[in-house]
Each structure stands twice: as structure tokens, then as C-alpha cells.
Amino acid sequence: MKRVSLSIPKVNWPKAGDEPFLASKNPRHEARLDMTYRTFGVYALAYKEAADCVVACAIRRRTRYPNFDMFPIGFLYRHYLELVLKEIICCGRRCSLEEARISREHNLSRLWKEARPVFEEFWPDQHLHELALVENCISEFQKFDESSQGFRYPTDSKGRETLRSLIRVDLRKLRIVMTRVANFLDAACDGISETNLNTQ
């Protein structure tokens, strides 16, 4: 069998000395993880911001495959929801992830079922309209990606094709919706944390 040569000139192949995780002399090119406060909320914010950046590039057609961008965008927004709900649950219960028994939970509907009572405890009979809208967004993500595999893999762990019913997505509208949802959920995280500090 004749093999295709990979000796293509002027291609940026890996070279000796390449290391993926090096410090930079230019602070603008560097991420300082030693200065990062590690919480689910911080991680959630990072995934949300990353999704927004990919959406911005896709809309401006600055990516090579804008249609394919929906896969990382969907995962990043979905993972934001998972992490921020876990943050709300743990802060609301004043417990660790292990104590809350949700460390391996990826089902957004089940996480929301645990998180919603926290809202009702801290803000009884308030924000019911917003809670319903957030719940609808979470349900949509859960419908298309039940186990956080749909946006990551073409098939799930049982070999079934993922995202079969998701055909077209308005990326700009998705970013707007997720920004509004994130504004509400992030404000709730801050409010719960502030309340906990004031009651210590």
C-alpha cells in the first residue's frame, strides 16, 4: 500500500523543546493559576466567559469551521450551568461537594431540583418569574444533552448518536439568553455567600 507523505513544506509541525505549560515573560500572555481563588463559581465563570469568546469569533467568522463551533460552545455553557448549580447547592447547604453527594452528578434537572429549594429558602416567594425562566433554559440543555456527552462526542456511552434533534442554533441569541441566566445565577451565588458571611 502506498503511503501518503507528511513531508509538506512550510507547515507548523511540533518541534523539539515544545512544552504546553510554560510561564511567560509577558504578563498579557500568561494565566496565573496561583492567584486564582478556586471555587465552583470561579470555574463556572471561566467556562461561561470562554463560551462567549467562541460565540464572538464564530459570529465574526473568524473560526475555520463556524458550524462546528456549536460543539464547544454548547459544552462550555452546559458546564457553566452544572458548576454554578453545584456552587449554589453547596453554598446554600453550607457543605462540601462530597457532603452534598453531587460530585458525580451531571444531570442538570436533578441538580436544579437540589438548587431550587436554596432559592426558596433565601428568597421565599420572590423571583418566581425568573426562576421559571432559568428552569426552562436548564430543561432545554438537559433535553438535548442528558449526561454532558452530547456536545463532547458524536455518540454517547451507549453508542447512540448525540444531538440528533438539534438542527440549527442562533449563536447570538444563545449568548444573550445565557448572559441573562448567568446574571441571575451569579447574583444568587453572591447573595448566598454574603448572607452566609453575615450570619457566621
Image: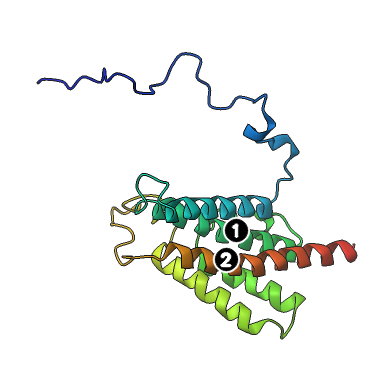
Image side of residue 191 versus residue 178, left or right: right
> Label 2 neighbourhood size at 10 Å, few (<14), some (14-19), many (20+)?
many
Q: Look at 55% across and 50% down and name the residue there.
A: 50
Residue 177: percent from left, percent from top: 53, 69
- Residue situated furthest front in the rendering: 60
The percent coordinates of residue 188 (x first, y second) are 71, 68
Q: Judge from the rendering whether residue 149 lies leftward or rightward of residue 101; answer left or right.
A: left
What quarter of the picture does the C terminus occupy? bottom right
Amino acid identity at mark 2: Leu
- Mark 1 is surrounded, within 10 Å at the Cα level, by few (under 14), some (14 to 19) or many (20 or more) other residues, namely some
Q: Residue at x 56, y 61 (%)?
A: 81
Query: Please, which residue is most extreme toward the top here?
Result: 16
- Give x and y (percent) for residue 170: 41, 66
Secondary structure category for the residue under label 2:
helix
In the rendered image, which quarter contains the N terminus?
top left
- Mark 1 to mark 2 CA distance (whole Å): 8 Å
- In terms of depth relative to the viewer, which is nearer, 127 or 14? 14
Q: Residue at x 64, y 26 (%)?
A: 24
Q: Earlier in the sequence, mark 1 or mark 2?
A: 1
User: Quick check: can you spot residue 148?
Assistant: no
- Say if 50 sits above or below 113 in the image: above
- Residue 183's quadrant in the figure? bottom right
Label at residue 111: 2
Q: Amino acid at mark 1?
A: Ile
Nearest the camera: 119 or 171? 171
Residue situated furthest left in the rendering: 1
- Residue at (60, 24) in percent of width and height: 22
On the image, the x and y values in percent for residue 11 come to 34, 23
Residue 151 versus residue 117 in the image, above or below: above
- Residue under circle 1? 102
Q: Does 145 appear above or below 8?
A: below
Q: Secondary structure at mark 1?
A: loop
